[in-house]
Amino acid sequence: MKAEGFVKDLANLKFENVFNPYSERCEIYDYFDAPKKRRAILKKMLEAASQVEIDAIWIGRDLGYRGGRRTGLALTDDVHFCHHVDRWQLDFGRLTKGDAVPERTAAVIWSILSQVSSPVFLWNVFPLHPFESGSPFSNRAHNSRERKAGEELLDNLIGFLRPKRLIAVGNDAENAANKFEDRCKVFKVRHPSYGGQNIFLDQIQSLYDIDTTISRKMTLFE
């Protein structure tokens, strides 16, 4: 698999009540070239990641309207967009207009990821933004058809990056990751939402042997 082909396959995905940030432009918030830039960012990240030994792919469920719908990056909001591209020595400007929009899950993820020096790639079971019918700025869980398409991409991604392990953030991610346990180790951690923040931080601390005290202080405002 080549990075360019992977991004092309991703951009070609189309589903009802799903926003594809790699091929679609949000008329309210996106700059005119946002989809093109999202494709370019992901392609360069994949190329950079393929040149190093990836410790893990952290897997979430799907893109949220406050996070990945805008950035095109899993578990990443506007606030942490620059941190994400910096990890791969890339340089890209904002993709969306107005103030940077924060997302709670992204804040917790990046509070601890900023202390992880090992190469980590962020992804989702379903790497697009599914929303409720008639409400594009809402979140819903992906359905079985969408999940199948996402798992096929995840299969290709694992083959391309060859991570040592998969870290599944939440139950949906664990269900998908377990299908690849014959290829790499799978670890499940609590999703940081709905009261799971401290458990998530403790589990990542254990996996990476780091101090989460700073992380908790950084996310108290949430």
Image (spheres, helix red, strand yellow):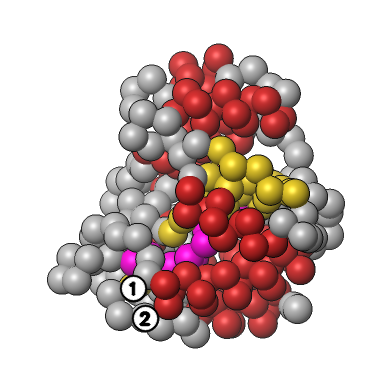
Does residue 201 appear left or right of residue 186 in this picture? left
Does residue 138 appear left or right of residue 153 in this picture? left
Magenta stretch mostly in which secondary structure? strand
Does residue 12 appear left or right of residue 203 in this picture? left
Does residue 34 appear left or right of residue 47 in this picture? left
Location of the C terminus by quadrant is top left
Count the numbered circles shown: 2
Q: Which residue is mark 2?
A: 15
Q: Which residues are magenta?
A: 122-130
Q: Is residue 7 above or below residue 218?
A: below
Residue at point 33%, 51% (across, down): 66
Is the C-beta separation of discs 2 and 1 under 8 Å?
yes
Q: Which residue is mark 1?
A: 18
Residue at point 52%, 31% (across, down): 200
Where is residue 203 drawn, in percent x and y? 60, 29
Q: Is residue 194 above or below residue 17?
A: above
The amino acid beneath tag 1 is Val
CA gap between label 2 and label 1 equals 5 Å
**Is 185 colored magenta in this rendering?**
no
Residue at point 37%, 70% (across, down): 143
